Structure formats: structure tokens, C-alpha cells
Amino acid sequence: MKQVLMGDHAVARAVQLARAEVISAYPITPQTLIVEELSEICARGELDARFIKVESEHSALACCMGASMAGARTFTATSSQGLLLMHEIMHWSAGARTPIVMVNVNRAIAPPWNLWSDQTDSLSQRDTSWLQFYCENNQEVLDTVIMAFRIAERIFLPVMIVLDAFILSHTSEVVDIPDRKDVDAFLPPFKPLLKLDVDEPHSFGSITGPAEYQQIKKMRHEDMMDAIRVIKETDDEFEKIFGRRHGPVSAYRCENAELVLVTTGAMSGTTRIAIDRLREKGMPVGALKIRLFRPFPAEEIASSIGGAPKIAVIDRNLSVGAGGIFAQEIKASLYGKATRPAVFGLVGGLGGGDFTPDAIEDIAKRLLGAQAPEADVIWEEL
Amino acid sequence: MAMDAKQLAEMKKVYSRPECLKDTIYHFCPGCNHGNVTRMVAEAIDEFGIKGRTIGVAGVGCCVFLYNYIDVDVMEAPHGRACAVATGINRVHPEKIVFTYQGDGDLAAIGLAETVHTANRGENITVIFVNNTVYGMTGGQMAPTTLLGQKSTTSPYGREFMGDGYPIKMAEMLATLEGAAFVARVACDTPKNLMQAKKAIKKAFKMQIDKMGFSFVEVLSACPTNWGMNPLDAYKRVDREMTPYFPLGIFKERTTADYL
């Protein structure tokens, strides 16, 4: 069934279809529509979930962790400052191997106050052992939330799904909503590997020495790396039932490209418009969308770039003192390759600046003529 | 009846914009009491002549634009952290007058811990707490102060104590702490209550000026937008529904700084 949905409401519908059992959240713009909608859905009896209103995001995620350890499928949503407040529990819930699914609506971090799109909030969580997906449109948002529960519950690590503030969260698009029975077939009920159960007693989170500690961290890393395989399998299964797949990365017209523009989130669709226009003019440019950030799809990125001598990574985020975060990670992942492209690290759109097709076309035209990056960070004023 | 020039010249100005209230348009919705509270704080600062040594700390929510209205230095605090930020400022500048301006979603929820501990330490600051029983800025979600049965966007059939708990009575809670010097609850729904509110806000600043310790004024306010009411009905709701649960009055008033 096709419906016109805002990104936030697409999330709520996906969580409903996934039959989340515990939802705990705290209001923050521009996420609030998600929990308001879920609150309505629960109140109408259309989702049999405990909706727990807590006093902060820190408690929201801690509450989800407790519920997950007790054996329930759990969901939360937040943005920006709220995500930062969750940081401690993000490490803890991943360490506890609780398969929580969270949606973060990317919003700039204060100060100064700003409500608009900026990825620095979620990318600041890169070392918390959470999987991270960046979505391009509302269909991908809905699909990824459903897939996330399945992935999380197979590898026992939590998953964050990220969408752009307002550009997706509050913008209406046509979304194909799957049938409930199909989702039930794709996503069976949550079966915890371990849980708090007085009939089968366990304690969790106890103290360890260095050897066990490192071993546990190593296992978590290996499981995270293995998640790429699980993500691909999940994509295959999803495609079989629903006819759509999204992939860790997706390349667009990269064949014989001199320059590949690398993007994430909502600007990826805009970039393809610019690429089509440039290709019509005979310019050798392509685009690569990165959907998965953790685990980092290094091999998929390297093979998608192909032989392009130059790539330009457009970062709507900033690690102050280092530069755009996707650019850093891509540079590091390409370093060991025998042939590698020149990487232009572009930073722009912080706090919501709009990358229009014209702006992206201008970037491509400029960089097609450039030999090497003139600086580590190339600032884009939009 | 038109006045002539002589009559006009003889008129005395008895009411005007406080000196430290900026000549700008409030962003608040029609009927919101934030405007009254902001003005009363500005009047108190003027009346004590402390504008040059007052620092405000704004919470997150509808109170966030404090810096646009009161002409003193203002520090924005992360959500809930105003009392902790104010503590830091006050410890460095004990001779300054430091106040926070916070709503219920900020102070009574995400910022409950630091509010209680700031009061318990007896920090010499003033807290102005605007309680309108909802998260206003984010669009009317259930707050810790939401009344039982009150509908909000996250309690569409009304707040129930099973699962959602009871509305928190901040003034009563803080009054139990030894460190609190002055704790009062006032309302903005009638001219009489506004005059009482002004007295309490002045008293709170006076306690700080006299180094008596933590002073706290909870102001019951209307949020017509998120309550789905016109302003007059919203003021009636303050009287009929809020004050019976959140009684007005002074809950604690220390008379000497050395309370033991």
C-alpha cells in the first residue's frame, strides 16, 4: 500500500510493523513526531507495546537496555543533544549486546543552537559499537528500520538509523508500506540469546581483568565486521519478499568516471540529478552513496570507485581539528591499496545548508579541472 | 474626552517598560504567561538596581530566548543543566546575582538531579521555574508536571498514574531540603496572583542579595497553544485544575543565613 508519509511517520510505521514491544523516548525536535505517532499508535491499541515516558534520553536508552535484557524487542528515537546524552549508555548497551534499534534524526549540535541537518551528532558515536545506516529517502528509512531489527537480533549489536532533519523527517514522500504478514515472515519474534531469567540465572556486566576484557572487545569487533555479511544477506532476503534492496553502498554512473562524488543521506538523490545533467554534457562523473557507516564498508567503497583517479567526499559533518569524517575514514581505508584516487575532502551544509543540484554540479565541474586537493578541508559555502 | 497639552504635561508616568526589558517582540504565543514572568524578573532586577551585576542562565524550551528579552548577560545551558551551570558561575563570581529561568520539561525532568543537588548545597542562586504542565517548545508532550487525566501528544487519552506516575510537586520537594532558603509557588492567572508572583520573585532575588542561599519560585503558567484553549479558558484552568493540585504559597523561608 502506497502512502504519502513524512520521514518521521515512516519510522513510526516501520516500528509498528516490526512489532516493537518496548518504546522509551524523550521529546526533542525534529525527532518528536516519531514518538508522538508511536504514542498514538500504542494508545489506539494498534501496537502491543509498552510506551515508557522517561525524564531524559539517558534514561530512555537505559530503559531500552533493561527491557532488551528482559527479552523484549525495543526501540527509541532521538536527535542531536539527546543522542549525545545517550553516549554513555550507547557504549553500555552495545557491550551488553542488546539489539536495540534507534532512529537518530541528524540535527546540528549546540552551541550555537541550530535545529537543522548536520551529521556530527551520529558520527560522534562512531566508537560506541553501534551499527549506523544513513538513509537517502523515506522509503529507505522505512525499509532500513525493518531490516535493522533483523540485523541487530542476528548479531546482537544495536543499530542506529540516521535520517536528515527536516529534509527527510518533516518532508512528505510516497512510501510503499509492506503488508504486515510479509513483515512477520521477514522478521520473526525476537529470540534473545541470553536474557534475565530467574529460571536460568545469569549475571551481566561483571568486572574482568585485562585478558578477558580485551577478548570480549575483540569478539565484539569481529562480530561487527561480520555484520557486513549479515547486512548483505538481509538485503537479499528483503529483496525476495519486498522487491527492494539498498546495499551498504551504491554506485551511480561510475563507469569510466574521472571523478566520483561520494555522498550520504538525502543529498545522494540530489547528487544523482547533478550527475545526469553532467553526463548529458559529456562529463565523466559518477556518484557513490554510502549507506552503511559502521561497520565501515571499506571493500565495497574501494571496488565501487573502480579506477576513477579522483573522488570528492562531501561531508555534512566536521571533526574539528581533523576535517570531514567520511573523508577521513575513506582516506584511511584506501591507504593500503596499490592504486588509489586523489581524495578531495569537502565540508559544507553544516547546520542545514542546502546542497542543491546546481551546487553539486558546480563542485563537480570545479574538481574535474583540479589536479590535487589544495587543502585537507575544502569548505563549501552554500 | 480629549486632554489638552497642560493636562498631558501634568500626567505622571506610573508604568513603563522596565529598563532591562529589551524593546523587542516576544516570540511567545498569545496568552502565554512567559511574557509576564520575564517582565517580573526584569522589574525585580531594576528595582534592586542590580542590572550591571546580574547573570541569567536559560534552560531549554520556550525559556531558551531569555537573552532576547532581558538586557543582562545570559548563558545558554544544555537541556536540564542550568542549575549546575549557574553553580559554576556563582562560585567564581559570588558577588554577582545569578538566576536561572527554566520550564518544567527542563527543570523537573531532564534537569531534576542537578536542581535538587543545587538546592541541597544551598547554592546562592535564584531559580525561576515556569510550570505549564507540558513540554511547550516541542509541541505539548507529557511532562513530569502534567496533571492526571490531562491529554498531551504523548498521553492522547490523558495521563494515568499507572505507568506515567503522578505530577511532581517541585516546590514541596525542594522545601524539604536544608539547603533551600526560599521556596514559593505563585500563579499568573489573575491580577491578584500576578502581584503575589511579583512579590515572591522579588523576595527570591532579595534572599540571594542577602546571601541566604538557594531561592526558588515556581510560577504556574498557562500554555493556551498546547492546551488547545483560548487564553481566558487557559487562565481558568490554572485556577480550577492546577492550583488545587499545586497549591500556592510560601513553602520555606529562612530568616537567618546560618540555619543550624
Image: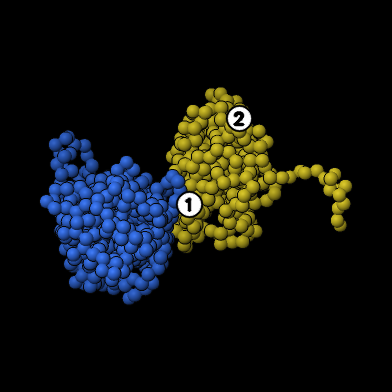
- At mark 1, the secondary structure is loop
* Relative to A235, B256 lies left or right: right
> Which is more toward the observer, A352 or A186?
A352
Residue tagged 1: B143
Give the chain letter at badge 1: B
Q: Is residue B84 above or below residue A363?
A: above
Give the chain letter at badge 2: B
Residue B209: mark in rendering: 2
Few, some or many residues within 10 Å of mark 1 (<14, 14–19, 20+): many
Q: Residue at x 68, y 45 (%)?
A: B17
- At mark 2, the secondary structure is helix
Work out which quarter of the rendered image holds the C terminus of chain A and state it: bottom left
Residue B52: mark in rendering: none
Q: Residue at x 23, y 73 (%)?
A: A243
Q: Which chain is yellow?
A: B
Q: Which chain is blue?
A: A
